[in-house]
């Protein structure tokens, strides 16, 4: 049940119709670690932070069983900083500031103690770095999951295409799936992406749920209908953390178990958006997660025998 | 298993990114009848057409067991005509022409032979007419389902609010639920609508599926991911026809059976959009419907025991 997680650990400034935070902890690997640590201990984190990253944040992660050996601390530089503002519909946002800081020199190194991990979660990063991580793994992980974004399709498409041939599961959102393939229909886009390397494709649709494609099969997980979405920041990474966390816990990478893993991811994401940043993820207990999973059963299960 | 269906029977002109039809059969009651007749015989149709409505269409409906006694034919007027053009995303459309013709004088009369029906489907119409139909039913049907649209919220809101107090299930789309309540959150909108009369609320979200709300419970049915949506016209009415058709067939109005009914509605709607107008609905067999329902089981069912 060993899991390596690679991605950013950062500060975010976020404005939504419900409020504003000037400097809270964020970053893809942060969200993945807070989420996956509900399911597996010894999440092996790979990231980079500056001198300003709070020690108490690192301590909190360590207390959850997150291994920080692979988290580089740069003593004379600041942590990565992102600032964004969400529109009323919460599905679209404007990036206001991107200060790379330590991220400009990030060259992830996999510690020797991380070798042999069965699961690898590559959070959104420059594709060349994602490739470098895969190449550093002496034994290929049983499952490699990769998240990416439109930005890399614009500035590093060839690198991205290369890394796609090296992974098992790709996660993108609906507009990224369209951008990557030039297909408007998500089914057509999925069919194209499944010829580009990944054997599994997850298309995230925010409040409209997520689709899992594999061969000619498709599975759909809804988002939980919520009274209010306070802050969608990190929801995609939280989804990824629940997905890979469940798979790493169960060590079962069948399509059937991936269905369950996507429901777990959706359940975890539904917590994430309830408060700003990762606040809610730090509060929830195993009982909260179990209750929410039962809500998903109620939300989608129906009795076909009634037909 | 008796079902009364009230709504329009019309001609449509439709333009989508995939093609154009200048004059095909449409209307809410037409779609409901073609769909519900897969599940119940003796669909008791209430509508109005002009001299130009093709006899062969009426014959086809009659051959499917649709009772046309309540369909008024006006010898010196034309049938209702609607023309619309869909945008690339197929979720938005512009109405180009609305020629009311016979609809301007529509005053639905429930034939004596329709009395005692257990199920009543009120397709989108002027709320005052929907109310008149309910008042004409000497024994209140076991379940009254009402579809409406934004237009009536703008021009006949008080009438609409009154008829809402007389029905069991309201069907609207997401933007209509927001408009009716002034709430952006669909959960908040649903909670408000459930205080306005209906005990059940269905919010249709097109390609993003449909939600069923009742008390504090919620159920979600996805739309089937399709390679191409050729023409969404009538998909909402087809959904309604599958929903009410299943309920009328099984005569079970429990929340659990409504879940199954919504899946049936979604399955029927997934056929509707595959070809222009009602073309596909005329072709499909019971075997096609059963196969598609199994696709929905595969699409959403997961094994929570794996958690």
Image (cartoon, coloured by chain):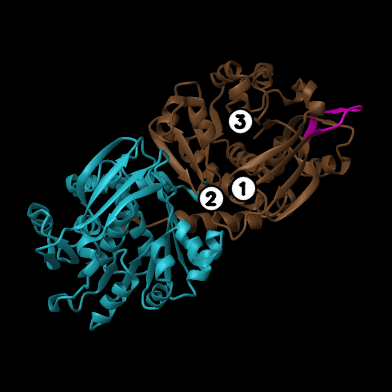
Chain colours: A brown, B cyan
Residue at far bottom of view: B138
Above-or-below relation of B6 to B27: below
How far apart, in angstroms, are the residues tagged by discs 3 and 2?
20 Å
Return the residue nearer the eye: A137 or A128.
Answer: A128
Indicate the position of residue B201 as horizontal and vertical percent values: 43, 66
Q: Around disc 3, counting alpha carbons within 10 Å, would you say few (fewer than 14), some (14 to 19), or many (20 or more)?
A: many
How far apart, in angstroms, are the residues tagged by discs 2 and 1?
8 Å
Label 3 chain ID: A
Mark 3 and mark 1 lie on one chain; the one further toward the N terminus is 3
Indicate the position of residue B79 as horizontal and vertical percent values: 18, 58
Report the mark closest to the observer, 3 or 2: 3
Label 1 chain ID: A
| Residue bearing the label numbered 1 | A269
Could you say whether the residue bearing mark 2 is in a helix, strand or loop? Answer: loop
Q: Around disc 1, counting alpha carbons within 10 Å, would you say few (fewer than 14), some (14 to 19), or many (20 or more)?
A: many
| Residue bearing the label numbered 2 | A223
Question: Of the numbered discs in the image, which one, if any, rests on residue A149?
Answer: 3
The segment highlighted magenta reads A67-80
Tell me the quadrant of the picture where the N terminus of chain A can be found.
Answer: top right
Label 2 chain ID: A
Please check the rendered image and state whether residue A71 is part of the magenta-colored stretch, yes or no.
yes
Looking at the image, which residue is at 87% across and 44% down?
Answer: A56
Mark 2 and mark 1 lie on one chain; the one further toward the N terminus is 2
Please check the rendered image and state whether residue B241 is part of the magenta-colored stretch, yes or no.
no
Could you say whether the residue bearing mark 1 is in a helix, strand or loop? Answer: helix
CB atoms at circles 3 and 2 under 8 Å apart? Answer: no
CB atoms at circles 2 and 1 under 8 Å apart? Answer: yes
Above-or-below relation of B146 to B30: below
């Amino acid at each position: 049940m060993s899991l390596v997680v690679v991605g950013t650990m950062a500060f975010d400034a976020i404005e939504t119709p419900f409020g504003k935070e000037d400097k809270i902890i964020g970053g893809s690997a942060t969200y993945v670690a807070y989420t996956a640590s509900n399911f597996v201990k010894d999440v092996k984190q790979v990231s980079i932070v500056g001198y300003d990253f709070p020690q108490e944040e690192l301590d909190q992660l360590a207390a959850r069983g997150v291994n920080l050996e692979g988290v580089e601390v740069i003593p004379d530089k600041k942590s990565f900083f992102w600032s964004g503002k969400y529109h009323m519909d919460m599905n679209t946002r404007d990036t206001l500031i991107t200060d790379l800081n330590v991220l400009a020199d990030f060259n992830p190194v996999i510690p020797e103690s991380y070798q042999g991990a069965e699961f690898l979660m590559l959070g959104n990063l420059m594709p060349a770095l994602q490739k470098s991580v895969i190449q550093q793994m002496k034994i290929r992980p049983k499952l490699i999951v990769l998240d990416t974004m439109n930005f890399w399709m614009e500035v590093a498409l060839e690198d991205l295409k290369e890394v796609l041939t090296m992974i098992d599961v790709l996660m993108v959102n609906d507009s990224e799936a369209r951008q990557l393939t030039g297909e408007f229909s998500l089914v057509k886009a999925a069919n194209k992406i499944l010829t580009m390397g990944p054997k599994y494709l997850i298309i995230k649709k925010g409040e409209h749920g997520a689709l899992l494609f594999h061969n000619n099969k498709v599975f759909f997980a809804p988002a939980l209908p919520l009274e209010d979405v306070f802050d969608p920041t990190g929801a995609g990474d939280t989804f990824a953390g629940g997905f890979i966390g469940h798979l790493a816990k169960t060590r079962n990478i069948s399509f059937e178990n991936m269905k369950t893993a996507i429901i777990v991811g959706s359940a975890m994401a539904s917590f994430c958006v309830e408060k700003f940043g990762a606040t809610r993820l730090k509060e929830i207990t195993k009982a909260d997660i179990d209750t929410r999973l039962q809500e998903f059963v109620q939300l989608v299960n129906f009795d076909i025998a009634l037909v």
